[in-house]
Amino acid sequence: MPSVIQVRPQAACATVEELSKKTVKLADGAELPLIGLGTWESSKGEVEAAVSAALNAGYRHFDCAPVYRNEHEVGRALAHGGVPRSELWITSKLWNDRRRPADVREALEQTLASLQTDYLDLYLIHWPVVWARNTVMKPDSLASLAECWRTLEALVDEGKVRHIGVSNFGEVELAALLSTARIKPAVNQIELHPRLPQTALVEYCQRNGIVVTAYSPLGRGTLKGANMLSSPTVQELAARHAVSPAAVLLRWNLQRGVVVIPKSTNPGRLAANLEEPWRFALSADEPLALDGVPHILLADAKACLRCMRRLQEIISKAALA
Ligand code: A2P
């Protein structure tokens, strides 16, 4: 057996050891489960049951954010799930209008209280923007990401968060952060699926020791038109391997060393998402077939419009929170 699963020559790869352990090592040696449960767009009233079902199915990695407006429910399910805190990996994120040091600390305390825990395994800057407190998209000229990062570093020193990272960061923003950070970002969480592969960014992160997490790995994220489950290529590969289309999409990211956090509130689908991707492997040429699925170009006006509308929805929800 080769020591590395080759996806294609230039792409990042996961080692066989990592895939068999179902975890990926962060720069400090901590092990992050390669499959987690996403909770974005998991409705209030549904997410508590979904998290309980996920714990029973074996999930130990949960991805949360206050802007999803359901952290209380997630916290209740985790607190009553019967799994010791030390066995859980809980990620949350800092919203865009909480960038000043005191605001960062206050936001973290709120998230910790909602999630009923006294530390996070991973705390991410949600977007590479800085808004004035309680505003939507109003830049805060007196705050900066660099200052925000220093506060996050202090929170690591204090043991309130075990790791810090970012989300939706591109290469330019990462380079700026890497040039000043005392503690390097452990993770960059971005939207990734075969229609939005972002291979250059994935490789940049992995070259710099930053683990990549894919949100919306099934292609139903910000770019709403990117639903991949009905793609003929995906369906053909699913039939060939006798797994679901979702498993093919998850495996595509896993084989390039990318963590996946598919969202589901359906107990059957969330259990399958955790189990099926380990039942098979995409052979050398199959990822190429998936890479051949037409990509969404961010320059594509329709995709951009959908993306902006989605962002506006998220922002509006946040303003109401
Ligand atoms: P549901 O919660 O009803 O299962 P993404 O994480 O890429 O944003 O995708 C989330 C969407 O995909 C949700 O609408 C979720 O619906 C659906 N979904 C999650 N897992 C599966 C699956 N295994 N098969 C089909 N749809 C799925």
Image: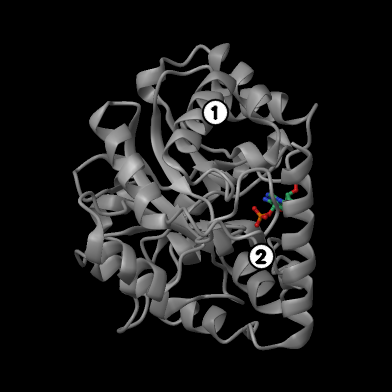
Task: Tell me which residue sits at (73%, 53%) in the image.
Answer: 315
Residue in the foreground of this view, choosing between 246 and 179: 179
The residue at which mark 1 appears reads as 111
**Looking at the figure, which quarter contains the N terminus?**
bottom left
Read off the residue under disc 2. 219
Disc count in the image? 2
State left or right for residue 1 relative to residue 19.
Answer: left
Q: Cβ(mark 2) to ligand 1 < 8 Å?
A: yes
Q: At 59% across and 30% down in the image, what residue appears?
A: 54
Q: Nearer the viewer, mark 2 or mark 1?
A: 1
- Of residue 238 and residue 186, the one placed in the foreground of this image is 186
Amino acid at the residue labelled 2: Gly
Instruction: Please identify the quarter of the rendering in which residue 296 is found.
Output: bottom right
Identify the secondary structure beneath mark 1.
Answer: helix
Closer to the camera, 164 or 34?
164
Kindly identify the residue that appears in the image at 79 percent across and 40 percent down: 320
Q: Position of residue 133 (x, y in %)?
A: 61, 44
Quadrant housing residue 72:
top right
Q: Is residue 17 above or below residue 178?
A: above
Q: Is residue 293 above or below residue 175?
A: below
Residue at 73%, 40% in the rendered image? 42
Q: Secondary structure at mark 2?
A: loop
Whether residue 219 can be seen here: yes
Left or right? Give the position of 98 relative to 158: right
| Crowd rating for badge 2 (residues with CA inside 10 Å; few <14, some 14–19, many 20+) | many
Q: Can I make out residue 243 in this image?
A: no
